[in-house]
Image (spheres, rainbow, N blue to C red):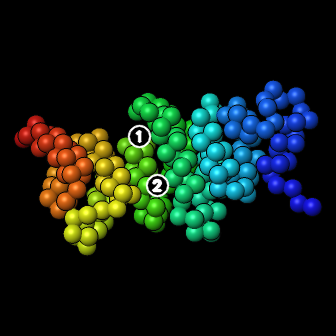
Amino acid sequence: MKISTLKLTLLLLLISSVPVCPLDIATWVKESGRNSNAVVGDIILSEDTDTSLRVIRALAQREDPYVEDIIDRIFYQESRDKDEGYLLETLLFSILKKNNSPEKLTNWIASNPHAYNLLVENLASFKNAFLKSYILLLLPYGETNGAKSLLMTESQKILDEMNHGNGYLTPGRIKEVLAVFEGMDHYNDPVFSEMCLSLVEKSRQKVVVRRGRETLQRLKAAAIREN
């Protein structure tokens, strides 16, 4: 009889001296370190969705920030399963929620450089707009060559979608365009002014227009300072 990774892990915890409740896998994950990543990855990829998401959220709360081997496994598993990146979406959302300052995000990327590069390099291939928005929010805190060009490319895709949708975007795309504005704010380069204006003028959604105008004002001020 085949036993699942989760059940095997709980059994090992039960007969070991690990000071956690054997039924609370989330607590165990939070208190684990990178030496447990192989087991954590097995659980995420083999158990039901609810369990996987619970483990992922606990993983993001762990003191040890190293998770790039897990991200690597999820990336290639979801690519095969065509799961639209939902596991990665949840993990990045949870990581951003915990690391809620520029310093913390910079440190997280420094601890997971391969995973960061993997996500950024494959940004264009993801269909999950929420996942793309979280990668874009990470972008300013990594040393990425061509980051501004990448922002511009994603902006053009969103603008094209606005054109096809009469100025309207799906909730995921709204999240993505707001992340684009965050990136434009970070770099504060007037080169983004025309694109930002186009997004604002084309959008018919108040949250996009309001946030875009804030960014546009900053970009205009930066252009004045340069001149």
State the residue at coordinates (59%, 59%).
75
SS at badge 2: helix
Q: Which residue is mark 1?
A: 141
Q: Which residue is mark 2?
A: 131
Where residue 101 appears, as percent x and y from the top left, is 42, 31
State the residue at coordinates (34%, 49%).
179
Q: Nearer the viewer, residue 8 or 152?
A: 8
Q: Nearer the viewer, residue 193 or 21?
A: 21
Q: Amino acid at mark 2?
A: Leu
Where residue 174 appears, as percent x and y from the top left, is 32, 55
Q: Amino acid at mark 1?
A: Tyr
Relative to 220, does residue 61 appear above or below in the rendering? above
Query: Is residue 195 visible to the viewer in this orientation of the structure?
Result: no
Assign the C terminus to one quadrant of the image.
top left
State the residue at coordinates (69%, 38%).
26
Residue 63 appears left or right of 165:
right
